[in-house]
Image (cartoon, grey):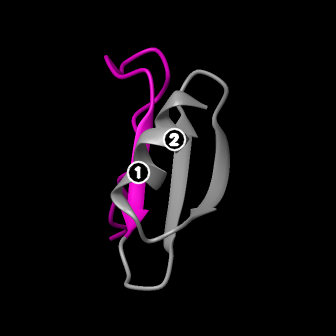
């Protein structure tokens, strides 16, 4: 019997979220992944290790 695989990202019509953000936090740099459920596109970024870098990323 086949098991049904679940999709980790909800379909655009069913999600109440505008975006999903994932951050890989490290001491030298932080890798970010932004997913837009409406367009189903991913955007990848790398920011510096200082807290201000996140604020700058969010403003951008």
Residue at position x 65%, y 46% from top?
Answer: 42
Q: Which residue is mark 1?
A: 52
Q: In the drawing, does residue 42 fall left or right of residue 15?
A: right
Give coordinates of residue 18: x percent, y percent: 43, 21
Q: Which residue is mark 2?
A: 56
Label 1: how many Cα within 10 Å (few below 14, some 14–19, many 20+): few
Give coordinates of residue 25: x percent, y percent: 35, 73
Q: Main secondary structure of the magenta part?
A: loop
Dot 1 and dot 2 residues touching (CB under 8 Å): yes
Q: Quadrant of residue 39?
A: top right
Give the residues drawn in magenta, as a range.
Answer: 1-24
- Specify the quadrant that holds the N terminus: bottom left
| Relative to 55, residue 12 above or below | above
- Specify the quadrant that holds the C terminus: top right
Residue at position x 34%, y 57% from top?
Answer: 51
Instruction: Give SS at disc 2.
Output: helix
Give coordinates of residue 13: x percent, y percent: 46, 14
Q: In the drawing, does residue 33 fall left or right of residue 16?
A: right
8 in the magenta segment = yes
In depth, the one of 17 and 58 nearer the eye is 58
Q: Quadrant of residue 19?
A: top left
Q: In the drawing, does residue 60 fall left or right of residue 13?
A: right
In depth, the one of 30 and 48 nearer the eye is 48
Q: CA distance from mark 1 to mark 2?
A: 6 Å
Residue at position x 35%, y 22% from top?
Answer: 17
12 in the magenta segment = yes
């Amino acid at each position: 019997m086949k098991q049904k695989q679940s999709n980790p990202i909800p379909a655009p019509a069913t999600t109440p979220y505008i975006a999903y953000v994932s951050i890989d936090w490290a001491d030298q740099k932080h890798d970010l992944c932004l997913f837009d459920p409406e367009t189903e596109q991913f955007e990848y970024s790398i920011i510096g290790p200082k807290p201000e870098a996140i604020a700058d990323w969010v403003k951008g």
